[in-house]
Image (cartoon, helix red, strand yellow):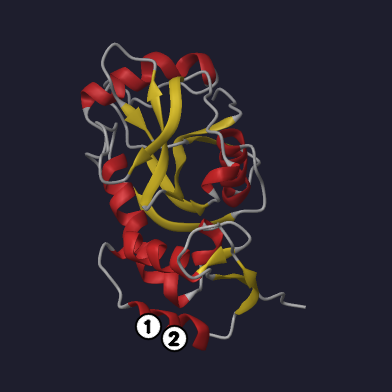
Amino acid sequence: MKSTKHIAQLTLDCVIFGFHDKKLKLILSKLKLEKDIFALPGGFILQEEDIEDAAKRVLYERTGIQDVYLEEFGTFGRTNRISDEDFLLFSSIARDLYPDVEPPVNENNQKMRIVSIGYYALVDFEKVIPQKIDLDESCDWYDIKELPNMIFDHQEMVHKGLEVLREKLDKKLLFNNLLPVTFTMKDVQELYETVYDKPFPANNFQKKILDLNVLERLDKKYTGAKSKAPYLYRLKSKS
């Protein structure tokens, strides 16, 4: 059997969330194909690589930053998750990047299942400039409400990633991972309203967040506007 650097039938894909201008965004690459089709950042896993290390590698390759919130959210392995057309399209451009990985077909030359492990990451939008790799024509931020045509079941992955983010944003106090180091209460509320796609009454929301006792209040944020200057906050140190 031919030895390979990568595991031929196992990949991972990352849903990388960012928050900007009251919009939830994610990083997508436009693949080098004859038709416009996009993909989540991802790739094959090295034989001697831990799964989470592979996710961190992909994240760093696409964002240039480390030490961000990253969590596995699901495994995608339906037998029909990759159409014949998508399989042929992707194989045509993947050979150069993964020359050791033969297109996974059986003895009857039929495509075999490729299983993908899904991770989601939360990053500060302002710190990230999406980076493309050899598979990509381009790589950029896209509004989650205006997703382009995506390969395989990547649209399903995005929806599942958003579902898990909604479950855990409040439970695990993840909001700070999508905001700058210092932020206003309005910033937090706008983030919540964007993620959950619904409004929150301002007074009740502020009380709820402050009652968590996880924020440190700093000086006011003066902008020169006539409106009352809001306080800045940051997450309390764990030490």
Percent x, y for residue 227? 45, 66
- Quadrant of the drawing holding the C terminus: bottom right
Residue 78 appears in the figure: no
The answer to whether 218 is drawn above or below residue 86 in the figure is: below
Residue 203: numbered disc: 1
In the orientation shown, which residue stands out farthest toward the front? 226
Residue 117 appears in the figure: yes
Question: Residue 126: which quarter of the image?
Answer: top right
32 vs 78, left or right, is: right
- Quadrant of the drawing holding the N terminus: top right
Secondary structure of residue under mark 1? helix
Residue located at (29% from left, 24% from top): 37
Secondary structure of residue under mark 2? helix
Residue beneath disc 2:
207
- C-beta proximity under 8 Å, tags 2 and 1: yes
Residue located at (46% from left, 39% from top): 11
30 vs 119, left or right, is: left
Which of the two residues, 142 or 112, is positioned nearer the viewer here? 142
Q: Amino acid at mark 1?
A: Asn
